[in-house]
Image (cartoon, rainbow, N blue to C red):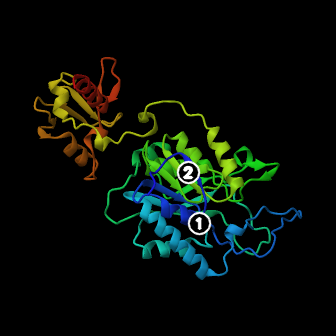
């Protein structure tokens, strides 16, 4: 079995190429397979201009049985090369995604999420006989239920304005300058927007991981993976697509920053700092006031043993936070503020980070 060489496009049919790849060698797979759109005639706009639809040979199958057989083979091949901790994304439309989902479950993949890519600028239904197709679905699955897998929750939250990212992603379709054209013609009929791949790759991999795309097309996955300091492998059988993808990825300029730039820190993986350490280090003083929320009226006194005191009751920063939020789960570090010499209320997390900084410098 040949050694896996990242950052390359491998020419050929994905089923044949996957069979030659080492087992359990990739961290993440994004697949944009043929949708089996079953288009039988040209599509026209009301102004008699022709719609650039998918009529390529790679999207033609004799019947559902042939499509299902093809899907099962390539998904099985992907499962073999995926690491036990790896995950796989598949995108599709109503034409195929339900069939793909059934086959994924039959092969033992475990579904983590179904994402709806809601297109803010969808193609209308020109004939007016159905609703406009304004979304596509992405299935996110892990190789085996219960295994650890990568999910950069805090990165997704940061991208979403510090709110937990939901399973409906409002993103435009690929148009304008992003749409690649060759001699004035669309290079690929189903080119995906880089913003979509940015979320997929950021959420489900880390810098240095290997991202595989078995239907590489014009290389969106490779271009975004390169931007995010991930390694990538693309499999593509069309020479014209390969040429476009290579030129596109070669044009991506990446600064040599450290990997810390490309991943959001996970507080759960940071060194634990007890609240009492802030008092031991002199960053807070016994008797000093803390305030619940930045503009809150509730006030507590810091005790010498690292507890808080309110009206004669002593408890931890977490216990009081839960009480003051009516029993809701609450991390005290997120609720308490202290005042500096200028009277500004500041987050006690600032003091915790100061402790971490001091202790890392000593190490």
Q: Is residue 345 left or right of residue 157?
A: left
Q: Is residue 254 left or right of residue 361?
A: right
N-terminal of the pair, mark 2 or mark 1, is: 1
Residue 92 percent across, percent down from the top left? 59, 66
Q: Residues within 10 Å of mark 2 (few under 14, many from 20)?
A: some
Residue at left 14%, top 25%? Answer: 280
The image quarter in which residue 135 lies:
bottom right
Residue farthest top in this picture:
341
Residue at left 47%, top 30%? Answer: 257
Query: In this view of the protein, which residue sits in the foreground, 10 or 232?
Result: 10
Q: Which residue is mark 2?
A: 197
Q: Quadrant of the C terminus?
A: top left
Q: Secondary structure at mark 2?
A: helix
- Could you say which disc has been placed on residue 300 in the image? none
The answer to whether residue 65 is visible is: yes
Q: Is residue 354 left or right of residue 213?
A: left
- Could you say which disc has been placed on residue 92 in the image? 1
Residue at left 39%, top 72%? Answer: 108
In the displayed structure, 18 sits above or below 158; it is below
Q: How many marks?
A: 2
Residue 230 percent across, percent down from the top left? 48, 44
């Amino acid at each position: 079995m040949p050694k896996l060489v990242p950052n390359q496009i491998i020419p050929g049919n994905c089923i044949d190429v996957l069979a030659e790849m080492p087992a359990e060698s990739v961290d993440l797979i994004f697949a944009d397979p043929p949708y089996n759109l079953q288009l039988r005639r040209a599509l026209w706009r009301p102004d008699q201009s022709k719609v650039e639809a998918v009529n390529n040979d790679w999207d033609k199958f004799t019947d559902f049985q042939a499509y299902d057989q093809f899907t099962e083979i390539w998904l099985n091949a992907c499962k073999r090369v995926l690491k036990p901790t790896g995950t796989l994304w598949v995108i599709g439309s109503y034409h195929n995604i339900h069939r793909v989902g059934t086959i994924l479950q039959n092969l033992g993949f475990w579904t983590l999420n179904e994402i709806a890519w809601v297109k803010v600028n969808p193609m209308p239904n020109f004939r007016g006989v159905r609703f406009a197709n304004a979304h596509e679905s992405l299935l996110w699955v892990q190789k085996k239920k219960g295994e650890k897998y990568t999910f950069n929750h805090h990165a997704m939250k940061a991208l979403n304005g510090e709110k937990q990212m939901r399973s409906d992603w409002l993103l435009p379709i690929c148009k304008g300058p992003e749409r690649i054209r060759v001699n004035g013609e669309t290079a690929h009929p189903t080119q995906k927007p880089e913003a979509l791949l940015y979320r997929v790759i950021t959420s489900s991999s880390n810098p240095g991981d290997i991202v595989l795309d078995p239907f590489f097309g014009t290389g969106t996955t490779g271009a975004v993976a390169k931007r995010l300091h991930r390694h990538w492998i693309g499999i593509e059988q069309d020479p014209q697509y390969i040429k476009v993808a290579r030129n596109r990825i070669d044009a991506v300029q990446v600064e040599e920053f450290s990997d810390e730039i490309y991943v959001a820190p996970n507080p759960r993986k940071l060194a634990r700092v007890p609240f009492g350490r802030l008092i031991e280090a002199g960053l807070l003083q016994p008797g000093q006031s803390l305030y619940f929320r930045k503009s809150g009226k509730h006030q507590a006194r810091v005790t010498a043993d690292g507890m808080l005191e309110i009206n004669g009751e002593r408890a931890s920063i977490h216990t009081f936070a839960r009480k003051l939020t009516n029993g809701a789960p609450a991390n005290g570090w997120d609720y308490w503020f202290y005042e500096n010499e200028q009277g500004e209320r500041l987050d006690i997390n600032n003091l915790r980070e100061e402790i971490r900084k001091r202790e890392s410098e000593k190490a």
